[in-house]
């Protein structure tokens, strides 16, 4: 009799375990799915806002609809507002640019599939992922070692093949030059000469230029001539000077 009474709780536990093993996923999986759905909706709202702000390039819109911005935030910097139109902190006093600026800069330089693109300031890896999603062959340089390692991991785990190195962007990346496109996501006070040298003939470069008052500058190279165009006023983190010549 006593043995029978003791068996009931065991049977109940066994039945419970069988039932949850038949559910479509564990509790943690379910929470992850709800979180993913919230992020997908937030990303869609970001896209609508980009279109309302005037972003028109269908390819850029498609790329930004695909890249999961929230997965590029380093551990400890996750934000439920990852798709809000503002920069996000990523540690080391650095930020990912606001989505509109990412879209705008990408649209202005419009990388084509297979084009070699050099990014200066990998940060989280998000901008590099948007460029890779457009089919560009992306090289990116980050000066903060922790951010370089973080972006390498984030890009790989999101399935993007970008070549990232830790180094000083003022030096460019001579081994892989010339680049059809150069995009600088930190602000130098003056135009970095080596980057202009490493730009291909017919190449284009976009960068925020200036110390306190900054403007986006778009530069086009044709043979020996370089044409620059002043664009939007912006606010980027400064481009840090490494130990080499600048
Ligand atoms: N494109 C990034 C945003 C970068 S913020 C993203 O999508 O997340 C600017 C980045 O430029 C920071 O990570 C900063 O560490 C880096 N940076 C600053 N000076 C640099 C330099 N001289 N060379 C390379 N990276 C630099």
Image: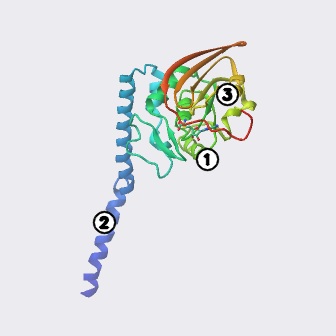
Query: Tag 3: Cα neighbours inside 10 Å, few (<14), some, or many (≥20)?
Result: some
Position in image of residue 16 (x %, y %) = 31, 66
Which of labels 2 and 1 is toward the front? 1
Disc 3 target residue: 192
* Residue located beneath label 2 in the image: 16
Residue of label 1: 149
Q: Is residue 110 visible?
A: no
N-terminal of the pair, mark 3 or mark 1, is 1
Q: Is mark 1 within 8 Å of ligand 1?
A: no
Q: Residues within 10 Å of mark 1 (few under 14, many from 20)?
A: some
The residue at the point 39 percent across, 29 percent down is: 47
Look at 55% across and 47% down and name the residue there. Answer: 92
Q: Dot 2: what SS?
A: helix
Residue 237, by quadrant, is: top right
Q: Which mark is residue 215?
A: none
Q: CA distance from mark 3 to mark 1?
A: 25 Å
Secondary-structure class at tag 3: loop
């Amino acid at each position: 009799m006593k043995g029978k009474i003791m068996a009931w709780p065991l049977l109940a536990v066994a039945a419970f375990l069988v039932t949850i093993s038949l559910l479509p996923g564990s509790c943690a999986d379910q929470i992850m799915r709800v979180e993913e759905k919230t992020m997908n909706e937030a990303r869609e709202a970001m896209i609508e806002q980009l279109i309302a702000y005037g972003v028109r390039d269908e390819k850029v819109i498609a790329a930004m609809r695909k890249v999961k911005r929230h997965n590029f935030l380093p551990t400890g910097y996750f934000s439920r507002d990852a798709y809000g139109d503002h920069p996000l902190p990523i540690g080391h006093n650095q930020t990912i640019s606001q989505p509109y600026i990412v879209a705008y800069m990408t649209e202005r330089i419009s990388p084509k599939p297979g084009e070699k693109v050099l990014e200066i300031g990998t940060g989280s890896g998000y901008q590099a992922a948007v460029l890779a999603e457009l089919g560009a062959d992306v090289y990116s340089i980050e000066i903060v070692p922790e951010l370089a390692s973080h972006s390498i991991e984030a890009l790989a785990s999101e399935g993007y093949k970008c070549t990232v190195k830790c180094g000083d962007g003022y030096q460019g990346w001579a081994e892989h030059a010339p680049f059809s496109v150069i995009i600088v996501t930190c602000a130098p006070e003056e135009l970095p000469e080596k980057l202009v040298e490493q730009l291909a003939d017919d190449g284009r470069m976009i960068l925020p230029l200036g110390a306190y008052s900054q403007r986006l500058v778009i530069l086009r190279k044709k043979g020996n001539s370089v044409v620059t165009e002043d664009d939007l006023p912006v606010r980027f983190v400064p481009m840090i000077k490494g130990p080499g010549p600048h």
